[in-house]
């Protein structure tokens, strides 16, 4: 079976979301007939070999993350993506076992200049629930020429966040756990939160069992209750960018136009000597 990703661009997964085109429903993907894009499987290589969506390509998100975090010239990343068969003019659809890795991959690809990147709502579990075909074949990849370009509007640096605090130019969302936010836990030299940040743990955005995003009405209430307005600039952060990627995805899904992931997050902020830290307070 081949899959018509090009058609899915025109059919949002859930029209209730302001940007429903960011999601693809497994049933719609299953019903497609021809392939015009790339499907990335972000699970482990072992899981991929055991069975995957027909035509899907295994991508090592850890390697992509390391390349993004250390890149000074994105040409090498463009070569990496090209070897995976990415065509920057066509859709990329991502799935995995949980939304964390999928959202991280989504963020990294968007930060590298790819615009047509979607997530399968519910990931691999949704595909199996839809009785989608499973393949054990390693697909042949036609290498492409990809010009990766760092999109600085997609991510925030430490200096950018410091400036946002000073000028109050963006809402800052902490997607970590309560204990991390309050300074009772954390894997850094200093514990606590970025001053002025509001706390909204990433796991609140998805249904625990299905890993599907919650309905738009619930997401809107979560953001509103936390004091986050998607129509205004938002910076998300966590420990190392993954949970923050889920938060960034949701804010954009709910209509956000200026959403940045502070990808180095607390791993950098909590270990720096020039960053202000405060103890977050539980609501």
Image: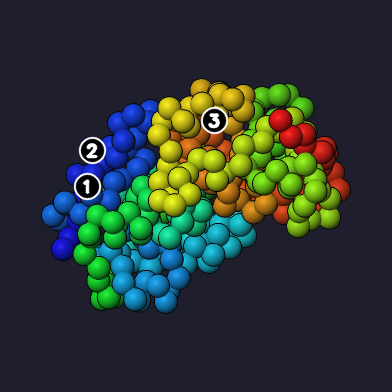
What percent of the width, then of the height, locates residue 245?
54, 46
Residue 90 marker: none
Disc 1 crowd rating (10 Å Cα; few below 14, some 14-19, many 20+) is some
Q: Nearer the viewer, mark 2 or mark 1?
A: 1
For mark 3, what is the residue? Answer: 222
Whole-Å distance between the Cαs marked 3 and 1? Answer: 28 Å
Callout 2 touching callout 1 (CB < 8 Å): yes
For mark 2, what is the residue? Answer: 11
Mark yes or no: residue 117 visible.
no
Disc 2 crowd rating (10 Å Cα; few below 14, some 14-19, many 20+) is some
Quadrant of the image occupied by residue 126:
bottom left
Where 9 falls versus 196 (above or below)?
Answer: below
Callout 2 touching callout 3 (CB < 8 Å): no
For mark 1, what is the residue? Answer: 28
What percent of the width, then of the height, locates residue 52?
31, 68
List the single residue furthest toward the right. Answer: 273
Where disc 3 sits, the SS reads: helix
Residue at 72% across, 54% down:
267
Q: Nearer the viewer, mark 3 or mark 1?
A: 3
What percent of the width, then of the height, locates residue 109?
45, 51
Choose the circle earlier in sequence order: 2 or 1: 2
């Amino acid at each position: 079976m081949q899959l018509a990703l090009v058609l899915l661009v025109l059919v949002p997964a859930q029209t209730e979301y302001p940007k429903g085109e960011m999601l693809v429903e497994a049933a719609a993907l299953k019903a497609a007939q021809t392939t015009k894009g790339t499907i990335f499987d972000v699970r482990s290589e072992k899981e991929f070999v055991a069975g995957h969506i027909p035509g899907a390509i295994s991508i090592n998100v850890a390697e992509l993350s390391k390349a993004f975090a250390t890149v000074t010239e994105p040409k090498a990343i463009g070569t990496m993506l090209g070897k995976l068969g990415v065509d920057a003019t066509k859709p990329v659809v991502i799935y995995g076992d949980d939304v964390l890795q999928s959202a991280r991959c989504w963020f990294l690809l968007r930060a590298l200049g790819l615009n047509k990147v979607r997530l399968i709502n519910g990931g691999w579990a949704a595909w199996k629930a839809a009785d989608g075909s499973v393949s054990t074949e390693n697909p042949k990849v036609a290498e492409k020429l990809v010009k990766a370009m760092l999109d600085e509007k997609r991510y925030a640096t430490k200096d950018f966040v410091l400036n946002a605090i000073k000028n109050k130019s963006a809402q800052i969302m902490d997607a970590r756990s309560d204990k991390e936010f309050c300074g009772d836990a954390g894997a850094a030299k200093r514990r606590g939160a970025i001053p002025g940040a509001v706390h909204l743990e990433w796991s609140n955005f998805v249904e625990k069992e299905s890993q599907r995003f919650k309905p738009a009405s619930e997401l809107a209430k979560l953001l509103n209750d936390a004091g986050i307005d998607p129509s205004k600039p938002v910076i998300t952060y966590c420990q190392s960018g993954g949970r923050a990627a889920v938060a960034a995805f949701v804010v954009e899904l709910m209509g956000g136009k200026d959403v940045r992931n502070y990808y180095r997050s607390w791993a950098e902020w909590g270990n720096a000597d020039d960053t202000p830290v405060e103890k977050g307070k539980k609501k």
